[in-house]
Amino acid sequence: MLFDLFSKRMKKERGEFPDIYHYEEVPNKLRVQIVHMLKEAFSNKSGFFSDHAKEMISQINDVLCREYGVFRLAGRHDTGFEELSNFVLQTDDYEQVLDVVEVTFRFIDKVIREDSYYFNRKVDVDSLIEELNQRFRESGIGYQYESGELMRVDSQFIHAETVKPVLKLLSKQTYESVNEEFLTAHEHYRHGRFEETTTECLKSIESLLKTICTTRGWIFDSNDTAKKLINIVLHNGLVPPFMQNQLNVIQTLLESGVPTVRNKLAGHGQGPELRTMPDFVASYVLHLTATTLLFLANADNED
């Protein structure tokens, strides 16, 4: 639960909340807040954990232990929620904290949302996720939980106006493969795998174009490139004629943006010199892809 405390309002007025995101740390204050949120979701108002909740937490701990190749997450005498929470508070690896957040909030989002009987029956899952994202923002940590994934955020405005709306559209079953590829691109970006990011971006655009062509009965070849697929949807009037000029601009962006960046920097062998893709290029491609997907998906759903 979020409270607009006096001290928080004063910090906002003085501009003390960070404007630039950090990615390679999770401060202790945020870790404590994460533990509070997890306790709210898994236990009742009195802090009691049901046997079912204990079993689920134990399974989460076991999954993490197996992935990390260890027998215990925290101290040898810790068990259940105590073990999980102490791990969040004590680990020196910030990515492990993010692992816990992603795994537990995915469980909260999917399981507790559907049936909270054995957990906190009064928990508001959407409010809890919003609190998590707000806590990240207040701490200046550039991650947000969206659609079952922790995503790296470079611009809060772009994320709110482009990434979130496109994820909502792509959640439809029709766009399942597109959504998976776009989320994979974010996962690569979060871990600094920038060439893989651009590859998945291109795949997501090609998948969306193929999905649109399939559902509308427009003929295409399964091996068609992005450029050919773009020409097909333009030729078939995916958007109204009065937007022809805008379409020409978008076509130019698509042809010279994502596909070209991918072809020049990621899609071919590196040759004798090792390439390193800059962060800003990968960020540009990722956000250009989000804007393009949003435009095409909105056009596809307009009928």
Image (tube, rainbow, N blue to C red):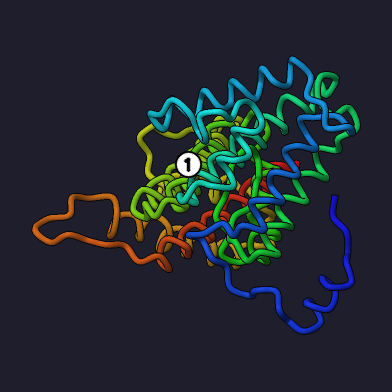
**Which residue is at a point 63% across and 26% down the rendered structure image?**
80
Could you say where residue 247 lies in the image, as x and y percent from the top left?
Answer: 58, 61
The residue at 58%/73% (across/down) is: 20
Left or right: residue 123 versus residue 298 is right
Instruction: Please report the residue visible at 70 percent of the width from the left and 74 percent of the height from the top.
Output: 17
**Farthest residue in the front direction?**
77
Q: Residue furthest bottom?
A: 14
Displayed quadrant of residue 50 = top right
Quarter-of-image position of residue 240? bottom right
**Nearest the eye: 187 or 172:** 187
Q: x, y (%) of residue 74?
A: 52, 35
Q: Is residue 132 above or below residue 273?
A: above
- Residue 114 horizontal/vertical position (percent): 79, 23
**Could you tell whether 107 is left or right of 208 in the image?**
right
Helix, strand or loop at label 1? It is helix
Tell me if I can see residue 230 in this picture: no
Q: Residues within 10 Å of mark 1 (few under 14, many from 20)?
A: some
Circle 1 is placed at which residue position? 184
Q: Position of residue 42 (x, y in %)?
A: 76, 30
Kind of residue sitting beneath label 1: Thr
At 59% across and 32% down in the image, what residue appears? Answer: 83
Quarter of the image where the C terminus is located: top right
Q: Nearer the viewer, residue 224 or 33?
A: 33
In the image, 173 versus 139, the foreground residue is 139
Task: Tally the numbered discs.
Answer: 1
In the image, 221 versus 27, the foreground residue is 27
Is 14 left, or right, of 192 in this rendering?
Answer: right
- Residue 96 in view (yes/no): yes
- In the rendered view, does 287 fall on the left or right side of 126? left
Against 183, is 239 above or below?
Answer: below
Residue that protrudes farthest toward the left in the picture? 272
Q: Is residue 118 above or below residue 177?
A: above
